[in-house]
Image (spheres, rainbow, N blue to C red):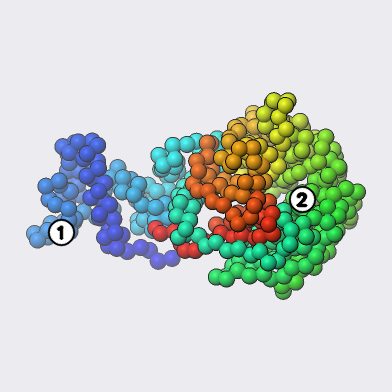
Amino acid sequence: MSLPDINEIEAAIHPVLEKSVEELRCSEGQDEVDEVLHQSFAVIDVKPISKNEGNSLESTEEEEPRITLTDLPTEVFLQICSYLSARVLMQTLRLVNKRLNGILSDDFIWRSRIYKRWRQVYPPIPANNESVNWKAACLNLEEQQERWSNMQSAMKHLVFNDTHVASIDAIMLINRGTLCISGSRDRHLAVWGVDTANPQLITSNEAHKGWIWGLAANSDSSFYTCSWDNTTKLWTLDEGRLSASDTFKHKAAMLCVACVPNLVAVGSFDKQVLLWDPRCGSKPIHSYAAHRRSVLKLCLLQESGDTDAVVSISEDKTLAVWDVRAGKLFKNNVKIGTNDPESNAFPMCMSHNGDNLYIGDSKNRLHLVDPRRDSKTGFEVIASYDAGHKDLCKITAVRHGLDCVITGSSDGTVRVSTATHHPELLTKFGTIGTEVASLDFQHGILAVGCTNCAVELWMPDREIDS
């Protein structure tokens, strides 16, 4: 990577510098700011910015020394930074010299920038500062806000509605968002290539003898499916063709699946959670019943590279945690939703990423759970929010990351909010389907499966302006 040219950077930033100084004069007083500038630039023997010298920062006819970006006091430099994007600061300005790199490498700068812009607790569940990449978090937050706030010009919307003939209850992006997998009640799988300017269908075939309800990525080119035909299958995509290998069977419908290397977890209609090690054949290595009704979603938590726990949610309105190492329940009967015994709301979807676990329920509520078992609030509901969809509509899908929380609903809409303690809406939009049945979000690409057989994609149409 070539180093940025300091003259080009200064030419671009001079107008911002002028604006910054004038705003400081307005907020702090002209005399006070001018005195600070005179004292600062006296040390480097250059002429400071004066309110009486016009707006130009070019050298005067007397060829007096010119103020450069690298000579600015830290306070003025940071004021300039507040007008520039996080990407410019990290990829350009930080490379100018050691001094600017030192300033912009301080995590406090990025934490303050996040708080000043959103005035919210971030991350939503307070974390150890060492576990948060504050520069990446700030960059992601800013770019997602810019992208979704300017959705019409920054995102390309594509619709495919001629492949499936029934509701698409499972959709997933793999291989860094270049492949989209859709599973439908028509028993078919479809694979879409979305890494080109014109995404298109790669292959489609009948994969099961029942509704396909779950997908889980195994690698960049392989994945698991689970179905109402009581089976879970491993599929591999090779040269545009799908082939099935491992098949796990059960006596009841399989509703959800999750996997990590050497472990596959499946939730079933008959209240069971089953664990398979593909190296050990087709019989489960563990099975347990932590719920009183069907298991609707589950996820696998890892610690230090090893699978630590299985988290499941059920139609019985509870969450349960299975300790994989100990081979026993760690926690169960964790109530999700209101304590009102008359309420019939139950959890329907789940998203785990980092130190946050979001659960969407059947009555338009989004619940934030602490997934850290060593925390005082481990596997407890930290907060619950109105998701903002139409009253009492189901939240059918949720995904989140460092930068945003995305929910899909039975009201046919998708909402994108900030990943802060109290999510703030960035944008909302409708789909062509009557209901959102499933969604996934990876590497800036949003894939949505609808009940009217449509697959919808929203893809970045251009890079975010710096």
Residue 379 placement: quadrant: top right
User: Which label belongs to residue 177?
Assistant: none
Q: Is residue 117 above or below residue 446?
A: above
Identify residue type, mark 2. Val
Residue occupied by mark 1: 59
At x 66% / y 64%, what residue is drawn? Answer: 161
Q: How many marks?
A: 2
Q: Could you give the CA–CA distance between mark 1 and mark 2, rounded to whole angstroms?
A: 67 Å
At x 60% / y 33%, what residue is drawn? Answer: 384
Count neighbours of disc 1 (C-alpha within 10 A) and say few if under 14, some if 14 to 19, many if 20 or more. Answer: few
Residue occupied by mark 2: 257
Decide which of tag 1 and tag 2 comes sooner along the chain.
Answer: 1
At x 66% / y 42%, what residue is drawn? Answer: 394
Q: Is residue 327 visible?
A: no
At x 58% / y 49%, what residue is drawn? Answer: 414
Q: Position of residue 132 (x, y in %)?
A: 53, 43
Q: Is residue 89 visible?
A: yes
Who is closer to the viewer here, 133 or 149?
A: 149
Element type where label 1 sits in the image? loop
Query: Given this view, does label 1 or label 2 mark the residue nearer the observer?
Result: 2
Count neighbours of disc 2 (C-alpha within 10 A) and say few if under 14, some if 14 to 19, many if 20 or more. Answer: many
Residue 218 placement: quadrant: bottom right
Quadrant of the rendering where the C terminus is positioned: bottom left
Q: Position of residue 267 (x, y in %)?
A: 80, 45
Residue 313 placement: quadrant: top right
Who is closer to the viewer here, 111 or 344?
A: 344
Who is closer to the viewer here, 161 or 18?
A: 161
Element type where label 2 sits in the image? strand
Identify residue type, mark 1. Ser
The residue at the far left in this view is: 62
Q: Position of residue 237 (x, y in %)?
A: 73, 68
